[in-house]
């Protein structure tokens, strides 16, 4: 009876076409962010709009270019925990300085 080595399960990473599609989406999101700045009607809600667009870009970069979409859940959890702490610190600092 032969024993097979048990190791991490390999998966197929996306090809060049997928990375080009992601790059096009990122370029479109960036163009949208810049255009948003110049639309006077959006000025009252520009911050939330830009934050949502930035989050979308961040998630695409993290998932595909940093390969977290294909990594172990442990690595995703470590990354997510670090992001949670960073966001909590930023929000705490914003609250602190807005209060004084």
Image (cartoon, helix red, strand yellow):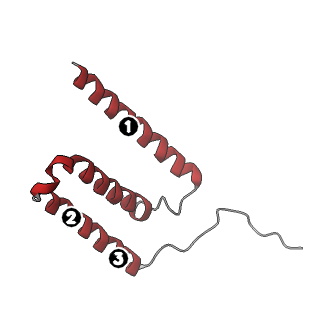
> From the viewer's perspective, is 97 left or right of 61?
left
Per the rendering, the mark at residue 86 is 1
Q: Which residue is mark 3?
A: 21
In the rendered image, the quadrant that contains the C terminus is top left
Q: Residues within 10 Å of mark 3 (few under 14, many from 20)?
A: few
Query: Residue 88 or 99: which is nearer the viewer?
Result: 99
Q: Which residue is mark 2?
A: 32
Residue located at (51% from left, 44% from top): 78
User: Which mark sits nearer the N-terminus, 2 or 3?
Assistant: 3
Per the rendering, the mark at residue 42 is none
Query: Residue 99 or 10: which is nearer the viewer?
Result: 99
Whole-angstrom CA distance, mark 2 to mark 1, is: 26 Å
In the rendered image, the quadrant that contains the N terminus is bottom right
> From the viewer's perspective, is 16 left or right of 38?
right
Task: Residue 62: name its quadrant.
Answer: bottom left
Task: Residue 35: name its quadrant.
Answer: bottom left
Residue located at (11% from left, 59% from top): 39
Q: Secondary structure at mark 3?
A: helix
Q: Secondary structure at mark 2?
A: helix
Residue located at (24% from left, 53% from top): 50
Whole-angstrom CA distance, mark 3 to mark 1, is: 29 Å
Q: Position of residue 24 (x, y in %)?
A: 29, 74
In the rendered view, tell whether residue 2 sits above or below residue 71: below
Residue located at (46% from left, 75% from top): 14
Q: Secondary structure at mark 1?
A: helix
**Contact between labelled residues 1 and 2, with CB atoms less than 8 Å apart:** no
Looking at the image, is mark 2 or mark 3 nearer the viewer?
Answer: 2
Q: Position of residue 29 (x, y in %)?
A: 26, 65
Whole-angstrom CA distance, mark 2 to mark 3, is: 16 Å
Q: Position of residue 69 (x, y in %)?
A: 50, 61
């Amino acid at each position: 009876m032969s024993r097979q080595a048990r190791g991490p399960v390999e998966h197929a990473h996306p090809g060049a076409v997928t990375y080009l599609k992601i790059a096009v989406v990122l370029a479109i999101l960036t163009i949208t962010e810049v255009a948003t700045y110049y639309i006077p009607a959006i000025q009252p809600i520009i911050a939330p709009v830009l934050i949502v667009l930035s989050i979308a870009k961040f998630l695409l970069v993290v998932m595909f270019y940093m390969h977290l979409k294909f990594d172990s859940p442990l690595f995703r959890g470590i990354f997510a925990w670090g992001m949670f702490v960073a966001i909590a610190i930023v929000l705490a600092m914003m609250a602190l300085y807005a209060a004084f």
